Image (tube, grey):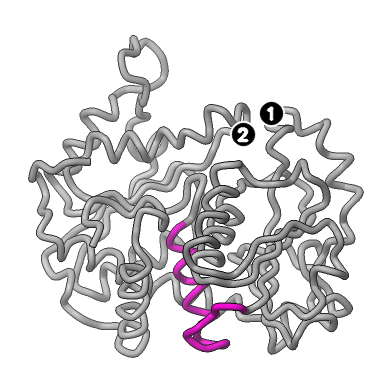
Amino acid sequence: MNNKNFLGTQDWSRPELDSLLEQARRFRANRLGNELQGRSIALLFFNPSMRTRTSFELGAHQLGGKAIVLAPGKDAWPIEFDVGSVMDGEAEEHIAEVARVLSRYVDLIGVRAFPKFQDWSVDREDRVINAFARFATVPVINMETITHPCQELAHIMALQQHLGGDLKGRKYVLTWTYHPKPLNTAVANSALQIATRYGMDVTLLCPTDEYLLDPRYMDFARQNVAANGGSLSISHDPQAAYRGADVIYAKSWGAIPYFGRWDQEKPIRDAHKHFIVDEAKMALTNNGMFSHCLPLRRNVKATDGVMDSKACIAIDEAENRLHVQKAVMVSLVGSGIGNGESRMV
């Protein structure tokens, strides 16, 4: 088992991921336990949260642990992440001290930090969570940065609930949808990774090639196909992509070539409002399941009819966040890595 951090699922083997999912299913059957008795986790939110904060905080509590919630720059000091910087600006303390001090207090650290949406060459380095991983001496959990591994596990768990444990060969469509604002590519990156990891026949449906995901995640997907079977294709045609699909997973994201120049990207985005998930498109599927990570703008990303249909498993997926995050926390503290111990990152 990878006992260092939970920064991304690509760092964990299929047997390890399957073990986490099996543990999550046990937690779904029995929510209360003492696996985290006497343990604690610091949850650092650099961005807003509803499901993530609730599920992590409650998950720790239900297993006897304690969660401390911090919002740097609001209820905690703003943090500097650049090594060698002259700290004469807004930041009051450096990540080198923050991560090491928290490691003396808690057993786990969770970090939620979105990109700045100004320069993708900088954002793709994911420097906030990687700095925590560098300086912390306890395991670090990704609560969403440029990927969202906890959502990946919750998503696959929901698909297995409804389609069966073996997802290999199922037709899976990851579709871009319109949103009035450009959004993070994290969930799209993660969905592409985990669906190919489980051997599904994956179609990435997006308006133009400008909406393809970062080459790092496209390459991960191709590597996963080679290792696990399944396939990866790209489509710009909703009708063709939906036809015969077993799963439709929707997400909005901004086009990476336009990072920091959203006014230039907006006309392209506005011209593709018809990518909305509606009843007509779902009728083309193989009685397919629909899901979304939430939050979702109704009648913008998906219609009321789709959201309220039996095909929609988004609520099951959201519930599963609680269960899979418990599994991740228990796995990491069960490794024997206690607070303050030295370990390699």
Image coordinates for residue 45, horizontal then vertical, percent: 41, 46
Q: Is the magenta stretch mostly helix, strand or loop?
A: helix
Report which residue position mark 1 lands on.
Answer: 260
SS category of the residue bearing label 1? loop
For badge 1, the amino acid type reads Gly
Mark-to-mark CA distance, 2 and 1: 6 Å
Report which residue position mark 2 lands on.
Answer: 117
In the displayed structure, 149 sits above or below 133; it is below
- Label 1 crowd bin: few (<14), some (14–19), many (20+), radius 10 Å: some
Image coordinates for residue 316, horizontal then vertical, percent: 53, 80
Image coordinates for residue 157, horizontal then vertical, percent: 47, 77
The residue sitting at 54% across, 37% down in the picture is 115
Is the N terminus in the top left, top right, bottom left or bottom right quadrant?
A: bottom left
The residue sitting at 24% across, 28% down in the picture is 96
- Quarter of the image holding residue 302? bottom right
Q: Nearer the viewer, residue 50 or 146?
A: 146
Residue 167 belongs to magenta span: yes
137 horizontally vs 22: left or right? left
The residue sitting at 82% across, 47% down in the picture is 208
The residue sitting at 26% across, 64% down in the picture is 329
Nearest to N terminus: mark 2 or mark 1:
2
Residue 28's disc is none
Q: Are dots 2 and 1 in contact, CB under 8 Å?
A: yes
In the displayed structure, 123 sits above or below 41; it is above
For badge 2, the amino acid type reads Phe
- Quarter of the image holding residue 29? bottom left
Residue stretch in magenta: 149-169
SS category of the residue bearing label 2? loop
In the displayed structure, 206 sits above or below 118; it is below
Residue 143 belongs to magenta span: no
How many numbered marks have been drawn onto this rendered protein structure? 2
Image coordinates for residue 275, horizontal then vertical, percent: 84, 61
